[in-house]
Amino acid sequence: MRVIDADAHVEESTATWEHIEPEFYERRPVPLELPQDTSWGEHNAVWFIDYKARKFAASPTLMRRAHRRDVKIPSQELTDVSARLADLDKYGIEKQVIYPSTWLGCLAEDLDLEKALTRSYNTYMATQCNQSGGRLHYVAVIPFRDPAAAAEEIRRVKSLGSAVALFVRGMEWDLPITHPMFRPIYEEAQAQDLVMGLHIGFGSPTINRMFEGMPRVKPDPFPHIHPLSRNLLSGLLVQYAFGGLIASAVLQDFPRLRWVILETGCEWLVPAIRAHNQRTGKDASSYFREGQISVSCEPFEDLAHVAACLGDDCFVVASDMPHGDDFSHDRVEEAFRERGDLSEPVLEKILWRNASRLYGI
Amino acid sequence: MTVVDCDAHVEESVATWSFLEPEFYKLRPLPVVFPEDTCFGSHNAAWVIDYKLRFFAANPTSMKRASEKGISIPIQELSDVPARVAAADELGIDKQVIFPSIWLGTLAENVELEAALARSYNTYMATQCNQSGGRLWYAAVVPWRRPDLAEGEIQRVKGMGSAAGIFARGIEWDMPLTHPLFRSIFGAAAEHDLPITVHVGNGSSPTISRMLEGVPRPHMDDFPHIHPLGAGIVSGPYVLYAFQQILSSDLLDEFPNLRVGFMEAGSEWAPRILKNISSRQRSKAQGWLGERVFVSCRLDEDLPYLISRLGEDWIVTATDYPHGDAFRQDRLADGLMRQSGLGEATAERILSDNPSRLFHL
């Protein structure tokens, strides 16, 4: 069966920043390698960007962890498009929508630098995906703190080709995504028919900073995230964003703008929608049934229970390739088939039809 | 069947602070009233505490909203114990565990003042509840930022009588409950046979609350004391976060007598969060449910579904009386059987057996 992978990733590399304008060249991100016998273990590399060491799960790919994966470095980095396509074939994926990795965090406090980095990233991703014969698409990054520049970048990425969505986290630089200043972004996204990809990420520097200096109580497989901040910093912020979205006017004011919620599962939506409906007297499940909001589901979730609330036209699937965390699935079709409770028509929807309609691919 | 209301409230009053030590008298909380024709509407009063105006839903009771509830002020404030007991009779409640109201927020940055306010509050609550013939109990407040004082206060409240638990919010002053600083507080609670009762708190992370200062309020809200864009980030999710943190930690191993309750955040999220806990810890965490970990449910949740997933031994419930928000639910026994379709045996578990194991009343 066809499979559209609604949420995979690229591991950004020095190639990603090769399109940076000359005036920013000296401030380009620089990967730094660390010894392996530190508390970082195999996460022994960081990005040096805007005067800080920025830490991520498996980027830069200098780190030992990146080399332990089944997906080889050139495919992780998308520097070798044919290698990525070969991985898609290996895992039974026909098309893939690629999200960033380092952009889950905040890369640069300097807004002008951040804007330059977004432009370089988007140009790189468009260049690479355009070589894939329509199999690879990407999610563009935009500078939320400058909505006018973001709108301009949205127009530009649309013209470059291969962009299907815009990356957004549960909070953007400490601001809720329903902040009025973001409206021009949603207006342009709607005009350019690009989806808002609401993905986990660490978009609140202030909440991040709360954990600085707190003792790390145990060794943790992901040292780039403080163990005491797990669950608060990423997944809960997406849930918060969803709650804000359905309580706000954004969905009504931009009725053709589609959203997809990623890497948080879907079961939590049922009580969240029920609470909203009771509070407001309105039925938020209609956004899912009518195709304005989609959500990636996990193979171990109670999909019948969720579908009873949202219908099954909103489910999409994700491999999370090449990430190696709880949400990664090498063989997505297999993972959903072996449940044994999903009919072929439902599988078809979940595995490709819904994502095809969502992303227009 | 003995019906236990696991989470009701008192509206703190001037009487609550009448036990302040003389050296803190001049710093005592002061209620102030303002006109009704402002953006605060009927929430037209606030407390001046530690040089700041502190806003709450229906407190101080000099605000118009408090008198609109249809519950007499002496009952709300617990200044008339026989009247409060009579109100419990009308609700069909045999025993009631009373939580604070304004302690859902942060009352004093000055930790010595906060500790003094906690002592006064606890003495007031013990004095009042001790007059109820065992019908009324309370959750004591402690100064989490001073574990030494908190441990002493736990011992003191146990000695005074009528304390049923120790009040905690999901985040205490920007710190997760699993912060090593707090460990001895959990130990003291376990030693004195008092559960830690994790309750929603509005603004218990001052840092996160401050993030919303100055962000435009998109609409006038029924609860002006909370920024509308903060709904979903400043309170409820902290309880879920604490649940995930505590059950992933070694707290329940280190203190074998420790019990923990999670209040006023619903319960349908529990199966999903348990899945997020590492597989190594998960079976242990599930074993704790109903023995040492309990969650308060809403009557309008899908309780039959929840019970089919995790059983019924870990669920308790509450009226939230006299608060007037979405969690208020009167007539618990009727509600459980009529609204949730549960049988009498299950209702008895939820209303009587499970609370007994949580609170040891």
Image: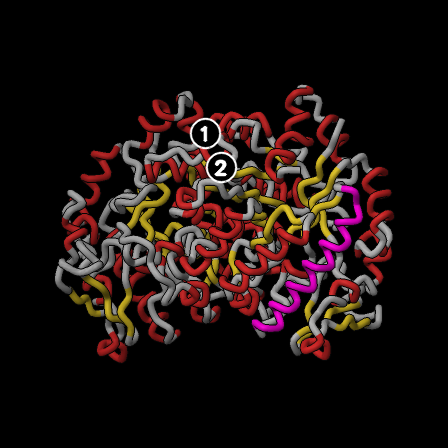
Pointers 2 and 1 within a single chain: yes
Give the class, few, some or many, for how many residues have Cα within 10 Å of label 1's Cα (few <14, many ≥20). Answer: some
Q: Is residue A131 magenta?
A: yes
Q: Nearer the viewer, residue B360 or B199?
A: B199
Kind of residue sitting beneath label 1:
Asp
Give the class, few, some or many, for how many residues have Cα within 10 Å of label 2's Cα (few <14, many ≥20). Answer: many
Q: Residue A318 in the image: x percent, y percent?
A: 69, 40
Within the image, what quadrant is residue B352 found in? Answer: top left
Q: Is residue B311 magenta?
A: no
Identified at 55% across, 48% down, the residue is: A192
Identified at 85% across, 53% down, the residue is: A80
Chain letter of mark 1 equals B
- Residue to which mark 2 is pinned: B268
Query: Quick check: B279 left or right of A287?
Result: right
Q: Nearer the viewer, residue B40 or A97?
A: A97
Q: Is residue B171 visible?
A: yes
Q: Residue A336 in the image: x percent, y percent?
A: 71, 30
Res B302 label: 1
Chain part drawn in magenta = A111-133
Q: Residue A346 in the image: x percent, y percent?
A: 64, 23
Q: Are marks 2 and 1 in contact (CB under 8 Å)?
A: yes
Instruction: Label 2: state its secondary structure.
Output: loop
Q: Residue B299 in the image: x percent, y percent?
A: 38, 32
Question: Is residue B349 positioned above or below A85 on the image?
Answer: above
Q: CA distance from mark 2 to mark 1?
A: 7 Å
Kind of residue sitting beneath label 2:
Glu
Chain letter of mark 2 equals B
